[in-house]
Image (cartoon, rainbow, N blue to C red):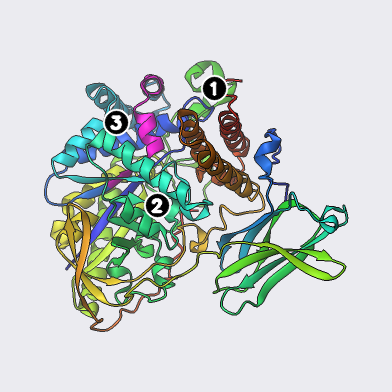
Amino acid sequence: MKTPGRTDDVNLPDAARALGRTRIEIVPRDASSVFVYWEVANLADDAAETPQATFDIDIRRESDDESGASFETQSRLDGQIVEVPAGERYYATLALRTGEGRRQLTRSSTLAGTMASVDEGQFVTVTAGDDGLETSDPQQPAGTSVRWDWKGTDSSNR
Amino acid sequence: MGAISLILHAHLPAVAGTPVEFWFHEALLGCYLPLTEVLRRARGPARLTLSISPPLIDMLTDAELLVRARAYIAAHCALAEQARAPELSRAAEAVARRSRAMLALFDELDGDLLTIWRDVRDAGRVELGTCAGTHAILPLLHTVDFRRMHIEHACERFAEHFGSRPRFMWLPECGFAPGVDALLNEAGVWATVVEARAFGEATVPPLHGKYAPVITENVAAFARDPESSARVWSGETGYPGDAAYREFHRDAGYDSPEDAVPDFIVDGERIPSAVKLWRVTGHDVSLDAKEPWDPDLASHTAARHADHFLRTIAADLGAASEEIGRPAHLCCAFDAELFGHWWYEGPTFLEEVLARSAEHEVDLVTPSDYLAAGPSLQVSRPAISTWGANGDFSWWVDESTTWIIPLLHTAEDRWLDARRRDGQSASLAEAARELMSAQASDWPFAIRGVRYAGLARRQIAQHVIAFDRLLSGRAGS
């Protein structure tokens, strides 16, 4: 992956590329991969400041804190697409590898996936009013579910 | 029998003043003016839903751009009226006749489509909505603050021109993630569209599948029907690929010497004239072997396809209604530009669908119509998804485009730091607008498409550079 901000034919200001903070973020991509990017900056740590400092990137499952994918890098400002097992919510950690082991520097927020909403599943009566939609009369589902192949035809526009 | 919502999402990237400004001129001539004519002529209870993105609103209210657009349309008409080989004369006459009518409509409206769309909305023929912000994919933004800003910007622009805040909001690329629903609700929006996958992978898959919307954070989410979408959208298996329809990719302007088409040369490069005189003929037929377009055959084919569309929909709704024990509903959502720009006969198809839906016992309702009836909806939070390939984000998060993400995320953080430190200001607000313009999904889409990749990269860079100058207090330098 190219260094964030570098393009083939434009020059972006240096300040656009870095935040000046140690961070790691994870971005949704598809059923089996995510995009993760990181920055290492302003660490008051002799080990971190050596040019050979090595950093560990770990994509972890929220459900059991197990690692879905991991790799090491010496790059302090970069990102890459990482394959992870599907169907889970993930977060990423950035750690410094030292002579004594690993020291976590930061972690990302959890990638938004599928989150249950309150009272999910029940039916409510919807009323459209001046202040928006209102719901009332919650009921448990009745009747049979419809047979529907939602994967059906690929009608994607992209 | 049941009902459908036919939802058109009208959007173009902000291309005024760029080498691809002709995208706007083409869309105005091919889609927005004919769509206006369809809406004005519509009678009866069938109603469409039209979402207009803020970048398109900006261009439709850009007086100088509209002057240039009119000049393009006039030049197009002149080219269409030029003498042709006998086998092309019928096609050329039909194109010229329709385009002259669109030019006359433009002049009648003084180029002001938004006012006429407001009028047809007030006459009850259409529900108008808008699209979040500058067409950024909300789940790919870094912060809730900027997701909220895009939604609020859209609501404000809409209210400016249509007198009230929208109840329906299109999500760019149907990009949904948990939390977006709460932001829509916060803004007063009560309906949106998600991709079918969003229902299929919900934690509690909706009992009625795609045949009823669900309610999430007091927002009704309608799932786009993949089957009817493919029938209308696909150039290979759908209606637009029919041999009778006008071929999009062969443009008569390219057959003329350059000195004969000066209006279609921009920065030394040819641009399309939109004078297209050949029909699809067959998928295996090369462009230079296409047969002349027959306007009468095409018109009859559009009517036949509208009938087929309604019959198929009616059968689907009938079977589903029986299965789920209540009237079924389908959401048929498309890019508006399909109708008239990509598919020349699309407006004819739309007009036939509107006129004949009642005889097929298919009600055409808007999302607000559906909700006004006080339906019983299931509480279900759709899954994270888009309407891209496989319902995911891979089209925009690709090896060629991942550099954009940390660049723009960093800018969000810098902007928020500046607001916390210095408070709100005019330059900070302008910086936010520059960043939001850089966040449009159109740019990574164009980079993936390769042909306009350089332009897209430059657009991102220009907005980021302007953002940086504003944030650094060096505006104008």
Checking the image for residue B266, the label placed there is 1
Residue B464 at least partly seen: yes
Dot 3: chain letter: B
Please name the residue that numbered disc 3 is placed on. B98
Q: Amino acid at mark 2?
A: Leu
Assign a secondary structure to mark 2.
loop
- The mark closer to the camera, 1 or 2, is 2
Check whether the beta carbons of the residues at disc 2 and disc 3 lie within 8 A of each other.
Answer: no
Query: Looking at the magenta stretch, what is its main secondary structure?
Result: helix
* For residue B336, above or below residue B202: above
Assign a secondary structure to mark 1.
strand
User: What x and y, as percent, mark residue B208?
Assistant: 29, 74
Distance, label 1 to label 2, CA atoms, is: 33 Å
* Number of disc labels: 3
Magenta span includes B64: yes
Residue B257 occupies which quadrant of the picture? top right
Q: Residues within 10 Å of mark 3 (few under 14, many from 20)?
A: some
Q: Amino acid at mark 3?
A: Arg
Residue at 64% over, 71% down: A60
Q: Amino acid at mark 1?
A: Val
Please name the residue that numbered disc 2 is placed on. B171
